[in-house]
Image: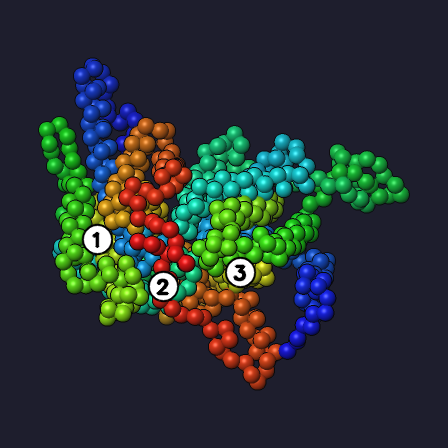
């Protein structure tokens, strides 16, 4: 067991609690930065998906985990971020401006949606966001002049200032000693990977700093009890709208990167199922933790790429055996993935409400306190339903 | 269900044209009313649960889908008489709803609200996978006594399936009203919906009452599923998504009010049908959700206000 002995005020303000934290996260950061140098491009692509989902999940986590607002419409914010970014890129806005611009648009939509609905009971937000996601999807398919309708919108590769050993087409400035300098489409899975990593680091730092600030503490207070928070002088509507806007903004950032990952946008890519996947990330990873979003996204991406492999393996392996044809039918059933995700959502909420990160903390505590660990430390308090109504 | 502009046929002399328009509006009205009754009944299902337990069942549409699939299995699969199959469906659904509460929801009592929202969404996805898998079909259809029937009133032809949906809604509402007002269990349900702790002290088994409410709600969903059959003609597992429109209806009516749920559902059904006729193709869903968002902005408490301030 490590006891943090605080001798200076700065220790309270630090991002890390003690040196062990710094070592652990530093090690993870080094591994992540070096990852594309050693990994196959296919795995880098999967890692991109992981990072993008982690960013989007982090956005949703700010709404669900920190402020206690259920949103079923984050697929819409992902979509708005993606479409806006792709559209701005198309009309010639540079990448580094277009990405935050698209995210700001998503954030603005979040504020516009949140402002009227957040005054009401939390359920209204869930329903409103659900309706919003459906409207957004319809608009994406109908507003052909901007979104390309059902044909979709191709996403242009961004141009960066780069130094390359080979000649750069179009944007070359000069060449010195065999090295070519200029604007080039330096775009492959690895460059997207570093972009995603940078955005994830930025978003995680944003969320972490937010939680250390009075604003973030107000969010958590609202999550725990709205009336208590209000009686402490917190302006509910304002803080909830702020939280929802930030949440939509971060998910919009993920949307811009998602556009580059899938390279061709279509309305179907942003259906309600994406919202459910984001919910799954938050629940499986661990509600109310930044690490949870990253772990949950890893879980989701691994599961998603594992299901087709398992399906093909089982179908090929036992496809001819008559007795086991039921298993083959099961693994090939349409909608299996969605059903499995739904089941996982239910199981995690019932049996592991703090998710993977919560389990990690429990295991860590077990070893920290080795012979003295008690199960009751993390036991959930069960009670009757606390009413939220007056009449 | 889908009457497009100009579907009325000849556009000749003025009188004939007016009659055509009149007929179109009558059938839009009937379509809107019957569809609205379906939305209203789905909304009724989760308003019942909401009133009693302060949870919202986001899987209500999928529960209705399960009901339709069970009725399909009994009526079309086993070849039972329609009314017998209908009755059995409702009984099975009541047990199903009861078990849903006992197995899943009861474990979540006292947890924050979003965990119940997410758990019910997850259950919806599981149902949407399990039902077609269990039956090994993609779509279902079964005959009801109302399928294809029609009632003629002068120049106007009324589809008997739609009339049955409206009549069924009225009967069901009266039945539920009597149940809640006149029976011991119904009054106990009202009590536990008003104050759980106090009714527990009065000796009402609140947990059991909750499970019963879930059972009733699932039973209503089963009835809805069967009543939707002659209107929809063919159903697939994603029919459960119409619950989103039922949510819209519940919000319009004022969440937590039973007459509001029915009325709101009918309003949403009307908006859907008339906007489908008036607006270009494909805008009816946008119209419905816009009405929902507009109600939230301008009259968030709905028609029959039920939602008060939150307590600590």
Q: Farthest residue to the bottom: give it.
A: A371
Residue at horizontal 18 percent and vertical 22 percent from the top: B19
The local secondary structure at tag 2 comes to: loop
Mark 3 residue crowding within 10 angstroms, few (<14) / some (14–19) / many (20+): many
Q: Identify the chain of the residue marked 2, using the numbered disc in the image.
A: A
Q: Which residue is mark 1?
A: B223
The local secondary structure at tag 1 comes to: helix
Q: Nearer the viewer, residue B147 or A200?
A: A200
Q: Identify the chain of the residue marked 1, using the numbered disc in the image.
A: B
User: Which disc, if any, is residue A385?
Assistant: 2
Residue at horizontal 40 percent and vertical 70 percent from the top: A382
List x then y, in percent, for residue A259: 58, 44
Residue contact between numbered discs 3 and 2, judged by CB atoms under 8 Å:
no
The Cα–Cα distance between marks 1 and 3, rounded to whole angstroms, is 40 Å
Label 1 vs label 3, nearer the camera:
3
Type of colouring: rainbow
**Which sits earlier in the primary sequence, circle 3 or circle 2?**
3
Q: Are marks 2 and 1 on the same chain?
A: no
Residue at horizontal 51 percent and vertical 61 percent from the top: A287
Position of residue A323 relative to residue B4, above or below, is below
Position of residue B16 relative to residue A37, above or below, is above
Position of residue A111 relative to residue A193, above or below, is above
User: Which disc, if any, is residue A288?
Assistant: 3
List x then y, in percent, for residue B8: 24, 25
Label 3 vs label 2, nearer the camera:
2
Quarter of the picture containing the N terminus of chain B is: top left
Q: Farthest residue to the right: give it.
A: A177
Q: In the picture, residue A318 is in which quadrant?
A: bottom left
């Amino acid at each position: 067991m490590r006891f943090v002995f605080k001798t200076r005020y700065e220790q309270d303000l630090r991002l890390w609690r003690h040196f062990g934290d710094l070592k652990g996260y530093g090690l993870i950061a080094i591994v992540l930065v070096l990852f594309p140098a050693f990994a196959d491009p296919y795995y880098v692509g999967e890692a991109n998906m992981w990072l993008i989902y982690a960013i989007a999940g982090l956005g949703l986590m700010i709404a669900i985990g920190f402020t206690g607002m259920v949103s079923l419409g984050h697929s819409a914010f992902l979509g708005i971020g993606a479409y806006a970014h792709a559209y701005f890129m198309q009309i010639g806005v540079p990448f580094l401006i277009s990405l935050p611009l698209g995210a700001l648009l998503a954030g603005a939509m979040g504020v516009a949606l949140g402002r009227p609905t957040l005054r009401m009971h939390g359920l209204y937000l869930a329903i409103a966001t659900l309706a919003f996601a459906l409207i957004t999807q319809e608009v994406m398919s109908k507003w052909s002049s901007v979104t390309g309708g059902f044909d979709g919108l191709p996403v242009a590769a961004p141009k960066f200032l780069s130094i390359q050993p080979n000649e750069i087409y179009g944007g070359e400035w000069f060449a010195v000693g065999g090295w070519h300098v200029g604007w080039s489409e330096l775009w492959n899975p690895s460059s997207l990977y570093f972009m995603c990593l940078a955005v994830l680091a930025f978003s995680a730092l944003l969320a972490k700093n937010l939680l250390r600030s009075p604003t973030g503490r107000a969010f958590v207070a609202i999550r725990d009890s709205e009336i208590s928070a209000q009686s402490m002088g917190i302006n509910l509507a304002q803080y909830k709208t702020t939280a929802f806007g930030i949440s939509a903004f971060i998910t919009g950032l993920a949307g811009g990167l998602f556009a580059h990952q899938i390279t061709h946008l279509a309305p179907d890519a942003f259906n309600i199922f994406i919202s459910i996947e984001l919910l799954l990330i938050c629940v499986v990873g661990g509600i109310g933790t930044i690490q949870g979003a990253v772990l949950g996204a890893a879980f989701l991406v691994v599961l998603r790429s594992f299901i087709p492999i398992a399906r093909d393996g089982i179908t090929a392996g036992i496809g001819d055996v008559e007795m086991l044809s039921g298993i083959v039918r099961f693994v090939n059933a349409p909608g299996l993935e969605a059903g499995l995700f739904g089941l996982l959502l239910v199981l995690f909420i019932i049996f592991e409400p703090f998710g993977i990160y919560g389990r990690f903390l429990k295991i860590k505590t077990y070893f920290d306190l080795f012979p003295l660990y008690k199960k009751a430390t993390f036991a959930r308090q069960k009670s009757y339903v606390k009413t939220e109504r007056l009449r | 269900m889908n009457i497009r502009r100009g579907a009325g046929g000849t556009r000749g002399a003025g009188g004939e044209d007016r009659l055509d328009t009149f007929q179109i509006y009558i059938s839009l009205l009937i379509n809107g009313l019957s569809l609205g009754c379906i939305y209203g009944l789905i909304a009724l299902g989760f308003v019942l649960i909401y009133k009693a337990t302060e949870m919202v069942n986001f899987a209500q549409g999928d529960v209705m889908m399960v009901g339709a699939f069970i009725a399909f299995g009994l009526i079309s699969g086993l070849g039972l008489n329609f009314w017998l199959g209908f009755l059995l469906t409702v009984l099975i659904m009541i047990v199903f709803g009861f078990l849903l509460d006992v197995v899943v929801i009861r474990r979540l009592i006292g947890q924050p609200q979003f965990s119940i929202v997410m758990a019910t969404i997850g259950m919806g996805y599981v149902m949407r996978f399990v039902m077609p898998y269990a039956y090994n079909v993609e779509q279902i259809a079964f005959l009801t006594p109302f399928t294809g029937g029609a009632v003629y009133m002068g120049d106007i032809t009324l589809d008997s399936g739609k009339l049955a949906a409206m009549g069924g809604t009225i009967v069901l509402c009266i039945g539920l009203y009597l149940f809640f007002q006149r029976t011991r269990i119904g009054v106990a349900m009202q009590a536990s919906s008003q104050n759980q702790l106090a009714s527990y002290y009065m000796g009402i088994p609140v947990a059991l009452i909750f499970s019963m409410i879930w059972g009733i709600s699932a039973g209503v969903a089963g009835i809805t599923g069967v009543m939707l059959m002659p209107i929809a003609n063919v159903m697939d597992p994603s029919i459960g998504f119409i619950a989103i429109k039922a949510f819209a209806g519940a919000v319009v009516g004022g969440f937590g009010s039973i007459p509001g749920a029915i009325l709101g559902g009918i309003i949403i059904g009307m908006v859907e049908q008339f906007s489908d006729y008036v607006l270009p193709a494909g805008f009816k869903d946008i119209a419905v959700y816009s009405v929902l968002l507009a109600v939230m902005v301008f009259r968030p408490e709905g028609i029959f206000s039920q939602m008060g301030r939150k307590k600590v």
